[in-house]
Image: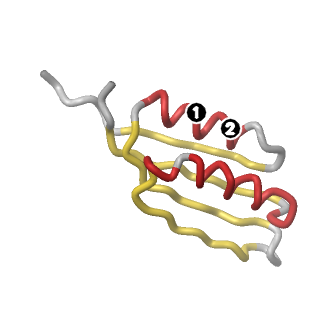
Amino acid sequence: MDKRFGFVGITIENKEEHALQVQKILSEYSEIILGRMGLPHLEENKIAVITLIVQSTTDELGGLTGKLGRIAGVSVKSGLTKRPQT
């Protein structure tokens, strides 16, 4: 499968409860993560936002976002560039 560039937006409610689970999954998928920016202290340290730049296949991205999305209090949105036209 073709690897394409894309993004993942993650919001974490109750950061104290879920941040460790999120970090564990991000470490598991570190080979597809090119860049990461986080805002950890929104609304009195209860909400965190993480943005990732990725290079991955649709299957790899689906695995990452699926695992993150199963964590209570975590919301995930993602997108990949369109496949190159042949």
User: Which residue corresponds to the image point at 63% horizontal and 45% vertical from the top-left?
Assistant: 76
Q: Are marks 2 and 1 in contact (CB under 8 Å)?
A: yes
Q: Which residue is mark 1?
A: 63
Q: Quadrant of the C terminus?
A: top left
Q: Which residue is mark 2?
A: 67
Q: Is residue 50 above or below residue 57?
A: below
Tell me which colouring the rendered structure shows.
secondary structure
Specify whether 56 is left or right of 77: left
- Answer with the quarter of the image where residue 77 lies: top right
User: Which residue corresponds to the image point at 33% horizontal and 24% vertical from the top-left?
Assistant: 1
Q: Is residue 49 above or below residue 74?
A: below
Secondary structure found at label 1? helix
Q: Position of residue 15 (x, y in %)?
A: 80, 64
Q: Position of residue 60 (x, y in %)?
A: 49, 34
10 Å crowding of disc 1: few (<14), some (14-19), many (20+): some
Q: Position of residue 22 (x, y in %)?
A: 70, 54
Q: Is residue 41 above or below residue 23?
A: below
> Tag count in the figure?
2
Kind of residue sitting beneath label 2: Lys
Q: CA distance from mark 2 to mark 1?
A: 6 Å
Given residues 30 and 53, the one toward you in this image is 30
Kind of residue sitting beneath label 1: Gly
10 Å crowding of disc 2: few (<14), some (14-19), many (20+): some
Q: Position of residue 43 (x, y in %)?
A: 79, 74
